[in-house]
Amino acid sequence: MSLLFTPITIRSLEIKNRLWVSPMCMYSCENQDGIVGDWHLVHLGSRAIGGAGLVMAEATAVNPEGRISPWCPGIWSDEQIPGWKKVTDFIRSAGSVSALQLAHAGRKASTYRAWSGSGTVPISDGGWQSYSATDVAFEGYSAPRMLETEEVRELVGDFRAAARRSVAAGFDALEIHAAHGYLIHQFLSPITNQRTDEFGGDLENRARLLLEIVSAVREEIGEDMPLMVRFSATDYVDGGWDQEQTNQVAIWAREAGADLFDISSGGLVTGVKIPSGPGYQVKFSQSAHQATGSNVSAVGQITTARQAEEILQSGQVDVIMAARQFLRDPYFPLRAAHELGDEVSWPVQYERGKFPNA
C-alpha cells in the first residue's frame, strides 16, 4: 500500500487516505444569504464519491461581513445549518469525512465574483463596508475601516459560534483560514498590521487574534475533533510575513489546540513574483513540519499520483491537498489508486467501471 492510501488518524478521527480536497471558493449561494444548496451538495458530494479521504468545503464566513463576495457561504446563522447538514450527511454516506474552513475576508471582502464584475461591490448593489487590522485598501478594492480593539475581541466570539454551528451541521473537522491575505493574515503580517494596541506590534501581539480563535474553537468543539490552520508561509516581500514567523506561530497554535497545518503562500499584496511550478509550496510545508513536529499538508500544483506519493515519501509531509486537479477530475483518488497499484473500495454503483478492460 502506498503512503497516499494509508489511513491517518488525527485525534479521534480516522481518515481513509491522505489525498484530500482543498477548499475552493465556488461563489454559488445565488440568494446571497450564505445558505448552500444543490450546487454545493453535488460539487462536494462528487469528490467524496471520487474517493477523497477528506472533503473540505470552501472559505465560509463566520459573520456576514466576512464573506469574500455576496455569493459566498456562511455559518453565522442557524438557518445555514440544514443546507450544510445535507452536504455532510452525503459525504459521510460516500465513505469520506467532511471539513469546513472558517474564514473572514477582512479588507478583501465585499467583492464581485469573477463572472459578475470586478472590484468592490458597492453598498447600493448588496455590498458592505469592509474592515481590517488596517485602513489601507487591498489594490483595486475600497479601503477598509480599521477595527477598534473591542471589535477585534468580538471576532473571537464569531469564530466560536461558527464552530458550534459547524458541529451541529455534521462536520468532522474544522480549519481556520489564516492565509491568502484574508483577515487573520492581515493581522499576522507586519505589512498590514501597524496597530498600536494589544493586537499589533511584535509577533506575539500580531498572532494574538489567531491564537485566541484557536483556543476558543478548541474549547467549543472539545478534544476529539481535528482542528487545522491554513497559513500563507510567505508574503514574498522583504519585511513581510515569512517562513520563520509561520513556524513560530504554528508552534503556538499547536499549544493552543491545533493539530495540522495546511501551508500555502501569498495573497496579501499584489505585484510580487511567485516562483510557481509543480509542487512549488512543498518546501514550506516541510519547514513547518520540521519546526513543529505536527502533521502538515502540502498544496499547490500537485497533479499526479506519483508526484503526490513522492512528496509523502519525503517523510516531512503527512497529507496532500489538491484543488484544481479535483476540478479537472473529481475521481482523482480512484484513478491515483489504480496508477499506484493500490486496492481501494469503489462506490458499489461504480464498480462496473473499476477495470478499464472489463
Image (cartoon, rainbow, N blue to C red):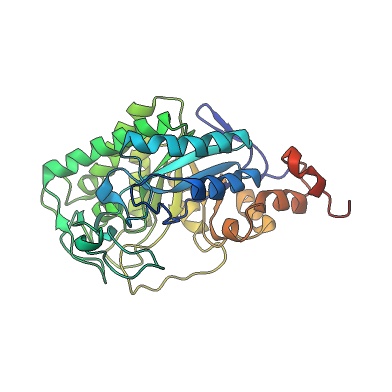
Q: Residue at x 52, y 64 (%)?
A: 280
The quadrant in which residue 93 appears is: top right
Residue 302 at what x, y percent from top left? Answer: 58, 59
Question: Image height check: is 341 above or below 280?
Answer: above
Q: Residue furthest right?
A: 358
Asked whether, in this view, residue 57 is left or right of residue 213, the answer is right
Asked whether, in this view, residue 189 is left or right of residue 251, the answer is left
Total number of numbered discs in the rendering: 0
Camera-side residue of 85 and 286: 85
The quadrant in which residue 158 appears is: top left
Q: Residue at x 31, y 43 (%)?
A: 62
Q: Residue furthest front?
A: 31
Residue 116 at what x, y percent from top left? Answer: 37, 67
Question: Image height check: is 93 above or below 56?
Answer: above
Residue 178 at what x, y percent from top left? Answer: 34, 49
Camera-side residue of 203 and 92: 92
Asked whether, in this view, residue 330 is left or right of residue 179, the answer is right
Please say whether residue 215 is visible from this viewpoint.
no
Camera-side residue of 322 and 35: 35
Q: Residue at x 32, y 68 (%)?
A: 237
Residue 187 at what x, y percent from top left? Answer: 24, 52
- On the rendered image, what quadrant is the N terminus found in? top right
Please say whether residue 74 is visible from this viewpoint.
yes
